[in-house]
C-alpha cells in the first residue's frame, strides 16, 4: 500500500535545545515518519529538512539546484533517528511547527508556529524562517520581539 502524501507530510516540529556561536541546535521531528533527527547548526537543519522534502517529492521544488559535483540521490536522513521526540531528554528552549507549503524561487514559503507563545507567522524564504526562529530563541522567555508581534493593517 502506497502512503498518500498530504500537506501534513510537509510539517516538521523543531525543538531548539541550545543557541550559540554556531547557531541553533536541537532536533526536528517528522510525524509522517514518526522519527526524530538531531542537528548541530542551522545549515545542517536546513539540509536535513530539504532531504526530507526531496525524498517525499513534497512539496515539489520548482528549481533543480546547481552543483559543482554530481551527487547520487539524497536519502532521507533517518539513520540513527530516535523513535519519538519524547525520548530526547535535553531541555528545550523553544518549539516550532514549520509547515513548508511551497518550494518556489529556490527557497521555501510557508508558516511557522512558535508553540510556546502560540504565535504563527508566514515566511517567504528559508532565511526569513531562520531569522524568526533565531529571534524567538534570542529573546527572553517573557518578551515577544517585534517580528512575532502582529503588524497592524493600514486602513487606506
Image: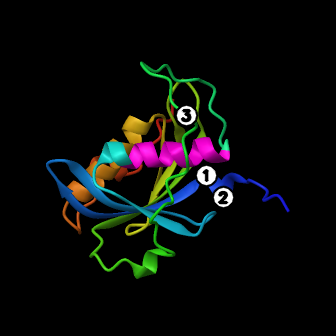
Image position of 138 (left or right of 104): left
- Viewer-side residue, 91 vs 132: 91
In the structure shown, which secondary structural element does the residue marked by tag 1 occupy? helix
Asked where in the image residue 118 lies, by quadrant, the reply is bottom left
Whether the magenta-drawn stretch holds residue 151 is answered as no
Q: Which stretch appears magenta?
A: 45-56
From the top left corner, tell me how far across and down residue 124 is, in percent. 48, 35
Spatial separation of the CA atoms under disc 1 and disc 3? 23 Å
From the top left corner, tell me how far across and down residue 119 is, in percent. 44, 60
Tag nearer the camera, 1 or 3: 3
In the structure shown, which secondary structural element does the residue marked by tag 3 occupy? loop
In the structure shown, which secondary structural element does the residue marked by tag 2 occupy? helix
Q: Are marks 1 and 2 in contact (CB under 8 Å)?
A: yes
Q: Residue at x 46, y 21 (%)?
A: 67
Closer to the N terminus: mark 1 or mark 3? 1
Q: How is the image coloured?
A: rainbow
Can residue 112 be seen here? The reply is: yes
- Viewer-side residue, 110 vs 149: 110
Circle on res. 72: 3
Image position of 143 (left or right of 30): left
Closer to the N terminus: mark 3 or mark 2? 2
Q: Residue at x 37, y 36 (%)?
A: 127
Q: Residue at x 45, y 74 (%)?
A: 85
Tag nearer the camera, 3 or 2: 3
Q: Residue at x 33, y 51 (%)?
A: 133
Residue picked out by circle 2: 8
Residue picked out by circle 1: 10
Amino acid at each position: 500500500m502506497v502512503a498518500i502524501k498530504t500537506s501534513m507530510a510537509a510539517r516538521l516540529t523543531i525543538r531548539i535545545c541550545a543557541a550559540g556561536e554556531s547557531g541553533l541546535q536541537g532536533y526536528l521531528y517528522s510525524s509522517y515518519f514518526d522519527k526524530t533527527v538531531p542537528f548541530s547548526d542551522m545549515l545542517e537543519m536546513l539540509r536535513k529538512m530539504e532531504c526530507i522534502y526531496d525524498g517525499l517529492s513534497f512539496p515539489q521544488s520548482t528549481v533543480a539546484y546547481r552543483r559543482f559535483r554530481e551527487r547520487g540521490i539524497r536519502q532521507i536522513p533517518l539513520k540513527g533517528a530516535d523513535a519519538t521526540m519524547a525520548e530526547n531528554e535535553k531541555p528545550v528552549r523553544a518549539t516550532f511547527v514549520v509547515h513548508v507549503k511551497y518550494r518556489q524561487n529556490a527557497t521555501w514559503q510557508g508558516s511557522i508556529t512558535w508553540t510556546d507563545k502560540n504565535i504563527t507567522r508566514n515566511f517567504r524564504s528559508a532565511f526569513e524562517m531562520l531569522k524568526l526562529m533565531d529571534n524567538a530563541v534570542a529573546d527572553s522567555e517573557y518578551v515577544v520581539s517585534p517580528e512575532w508581534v502582529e503588524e497592524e493593517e493600514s486602513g487606506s
